[in-house]
Amino acid sequence: MSFQTKRLGTRPDAIAPDGSEVRILCSVGRGSLARFTLPPHAVSQAVAHRTVDEVWYFLSGRGQMWRRSPDVEEIVDVEPGVSITIPLGTSFQFRSLSHEPLSAVGTTMPPWPGEDEAFAVGGVWKPTV
């Protein structure tokens, strides 16, 4: 076993399949942590995941998150202090509605497996990233 300690980077480590900036944080065998940032007034690509669940906690900005599963579809307002789940197979898209970036810390379980994990789906808003 080893421990990880990591400081949030000033530059993105990657661009997520949804178009948001990703800053990779720590991971363990059963999960990983990252910070996702969407620029002010931007709209993400709509995607779904093949094998992972995610839990997000919003840190800054104000926006909306659309989620659709076979059983339910909803749009919720997000802002600092709001947490949401993205269960396996859920289609989702998010947008920033403020003058500051919309950012969240997200846990991915199991850890993010790579680029082929997410696939494009039809969303509710026209993407800008």
Image: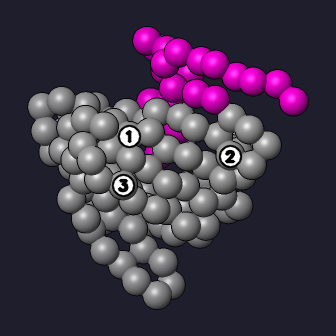
Which dot marks residue 83? 3
Verify CB contact (< 8 Å) between mark 1 and mark 3.
Answer: no
Residue 19 in view? no
Which residue sits at x=74%, y=49%?
30
- In the depicted structure, whether residue 126 falls above or below residue 41: below
Q: What stretch is highlighted in magenta?
A: 1-26
Give the residue displayed 82% in from the left and 24% down from the top: 2
Please name the residue shown 87% across and 30% down the image: 1
| Residue 129 shown left or right of residue 118 in the figure | left
Horizontal relation, residue 111 to residue 9: left or right: right
- In the displayed structure, 13 sits above or below 43; it is above
Task: Give amino acid for label 3.
Answer: Ser
Hey, what amino acid is under mark 1? Ala
Q: Earlier in the sequence, mark 3 or mark 2?
A: 2
Amino acid type at circle 2 is: Gly
Label 1 neighbourhood size at 10 Å, few (<14), some (14-19), many (20+)? many
Which comes before the other along the chain, label 1 or label 2? 2
To which residue does mark 2 refer? 31
Q: Mark 1 points at which residue?
A: 104
For the residues labelled 1 and 2, the Cα–Cα distance comes to 16 Å
Q: Is residue 106 above or below residue 82?
A: above
- Residue at position x 56%, y 21% from top? 13
Image-based side of 1 in relation to 84, left or right? right
Q: Is residue 64 magenta?
A: no
